[in-house]
Image: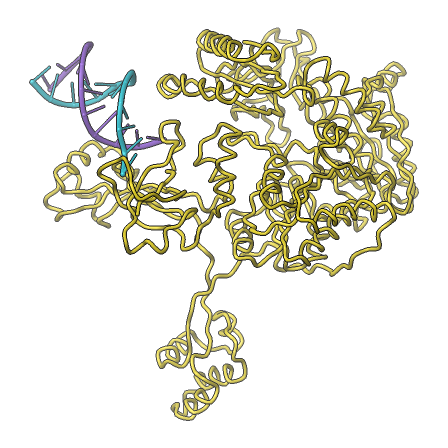
Chain colours: A yellow, B purple, C cyan
Amino acid sequence: MIAKVIVDVPAKQTDRAFDYLVPESLEDVIKPGVRVIVPFGPRKIQGFVIGFSDRSEFTGLKEIIEPMDLTPVLNEELLGLGDWLTEQTLSYKISAFQVMLPAALKAKYEKKIKLRQSMDQLPEQLQFLFEKNDTILWNEAEGYLAQLQKEATKGTVEVLYEVKERVKKKKLKHISAKVSKEELMTQKEQLAANAEKQKAVLDFFIENPKSIEQRELLSILDVPATTIKSLVKKGLLLEEDLEVYRDPYEDRVFEKTKPLTLTAEQERAISSILATLGENMQKVFLLYGVTSSGKTEIYLQSIQRAIEMGKEAIVLVPEISLTPQMVKRFKGRFGNEVAVLHSGLSSGEKYDEWRKIERKEVKVVVGARSAIFAPFENLGIIIIDEEHETSYKQEDNPRYHARDVAIQRANFHQCPVILGSATPSLETFARAQKGVYEQLNLPKRMNNQALPSVEIIDMREELREGNRSMFSRALIEGLKDRLEKKQQIVLFLNKRGHSSFVMCRDCGYVDNCPNCDISLTYHRFSQQMKCHYCGYESYVPSTCPECNSEHIRYFGTGTQKVEEELGKVLPEARVIRMDVDTTSRKGAHEKLLNDFQDGKADILLGTQMIAKGLDFPNITLVGVLSADTMLHLPDFRSSEKTFQLLTQVSGRAGRHELPGEVIIQTYTPEHYSVELAATQNFDHFFEREMMIRRAHQYPPYYYIALITVSHENVAYVASTTDKITKFVQSKLSREASVLGPVASPISRIKNRYRYQCLIKYKREPNLNQTLKTILEHYQQEMVSKGLQISIDVNPYILM
DNA sequence: AGCACGCCGACT
DNA sequence: GTCGGCGTGCTC
């Protein structure tokens, strides 16, 4: 039997199956989807079995060394999905497989040197290396490698390549009775009279026939481990290592919730979904509901139905660690049937959650982007909450969009996909309008609570009238008012777009990174300037390096700065600040939110991370400090993102009995995305933005693909990009526009110059082949000259 | 990605 | 004469 194996070498030349003989003894274990260790040249590496064949064109086949799994980690569906991913994203097969699995299953490689003959066969100056051990790590022999290599050819030492698992299954020693209760009793009689500890242990097992963790047993009975050992030796007790899961929510109790009664609107929406569920068909729904309109309850009850039908469910949420409330809702309804996968977990914890899915111990997975690959085999429904979120697009290879994967998987399982949002992406909304997706509307908030009133404040006007602070007079008024009424406030700082940079007020000099074409960010905590792209650090300049002026200071507002200012204006206000600094510690996020919920603070101040999911009854005022910082980014989606963000943030106010108010501060009050977010008029915004997209040939009217070329030499990059652009032009139809070559918006990162070519097209069956040809053609130069070409067929970041 | 093989410059 | 630079090609 010959196995086709995809090897763990992410390179163009090795991006195909290699044939290996399956040793007879392994024929039962080696199945498609099993990871194996195979010899590859002089080394050993990991590979994935994708299929079998009885013949090979290749002579001199090698044998598979050993399997790494007893059961496949990728089932037939996921193997196929891997092929599809490879084709869609132009990535390597191996990368596609690895992205579908928890990182813990990625192999770790170790290179070692082993002494083969007696020490005295070795030149004297090398002997000390092997004094302690006959095997040392390759890096430990630094400086002697050349000599050792010579020894290796003589055979005194041998170079070993090892493939290691990254994470061990967590196992704990469990003890149980090996014989019957009666037998234990008779054996107890025969123990020496003074063997009281042993008798106590036997008594315990006579009472409790179940197995128990050794550590626990020892602490209950207060006996030494040797007592257990001797009973095991006598054959009365059984000692075994059982796999236990690292459960991140272990010590948490989730209050059980029951399905709520649905409103007439919810009822109407869910009936369509349930019908599709019952008919076993693939269909995509857009659940378009304003903030607080009860989308989650629809998710919960749809999943309920899927479970009742014996099926499973995937729920994607944007970066779930940021919404503990969401986890609570799912765990509350489905208890132990839920696995949670998000970036806040350690790789061991992620692996354990994944194992629960693989072993069919859960029915529902709630997680961020990569949870879309959960290895369920009987998927009944896929839900993508906050469908418009850009974090569903992976920004490195394979550059997939979870929404596309979801639809692909739903096609395989013939099940519904629900895309939920109050502010759908234009792509999705356009498809719903065309009838490709079925649109379900929830236009009203639950319990008919009115949407909050929104006021837009023109900060230029404030400035003209002499208010130079970052808070408008209206906002200060509002803050004071809520403090008095003991109501809560959310202050939102839109940081994306500009962070704190240092500029000279006299000459306009900006402190830039020497390696990247981007300004350095001021970090108050470490009193340093840092580059977000390459990590370069320097001190904060006290005088301008250009003109020696002392009027050099930082611009832009960080949350710390706002907190400080807030303290000056409203010293009595209790503020909780949420940003990367205060939430980096595990569980910090949740604790801060709990404190806020418990009323330990009046104001919650934060960045993007507080924009969604917050649902506290006492919030009656939401302030947006700077609405328009994103509008000026070189990104055709910036209006869309601004609109979405403002709408989401506004939705935090007045979700329960108390009416809500929103104050949006902006320097561009006339911009339609600000104006229309104030009235929460998505439909109007959609029309407006669609006109612009059509005029500029952007999605959803056109598809786009972005080729980015980078190298240390500008001229080389420019000329290569030029050749690529011309080539693409020659291969595509007249319908497509190929723009370039131009320098990327961030024209240099880590001293590499960056050029790009943007392709806008409607239908180009040749495109993928053309792009593949480019990668193939430049493959040599990519390895030998360090040229980088990255292709993103549906980019979300154009920088 | 590694690693070996192979063909040209500066050294004991 | 050889050590070693990294360009080229292969890995079942």
Q: Is residue A519 above or below residue A131?
A: above
Q: Is residue A96 above or below residue A465?
A: below
Instruction: Out of A728 and A154, give the one closest to the viewer.
Output: A728
User: What residue is shown at x 87% (from left), y 19% (from top)?
Assistant: A462
- The quadrant of the image that shows the C terminus of chain A is top right
In the rendered image, residue A6, in percent from the top left (x then y), is placed at 38, 38
User: What residue is shown at x 84% (from left), y 31% (from top)?
Assistant: A569
Residue A98 makes an appearance in the image: yes
Q: Residue A108 appears in which quarter of the rendering?
A: top left
Q: Is residue A634 above or below residue A36?
A: above
Instruction: Out of A63 and A742, give the one closest to the viewer.
Output: A63
Q: Residue A400 appears in which quarter of the rendering?
A: top right
Q: Is residue A610 above or below residue A309?
A: above
Judge from the rendering whether residue A11 lies leftward or rightward of residue A670; answer left or right: left
Judge from the rendering whether residue A124 lies leftward or rightward of residue A145; answer left or right: left
User: What residue is shown at x 36% (from left), y 41% (from top)?
Assistant: A4
User: What residue is shown at x 50% (from left), y 44% (from top)?
Assistant: A101
In the rendered image, residue A772, in percent from the top left (x then y), is placed at 46, 22
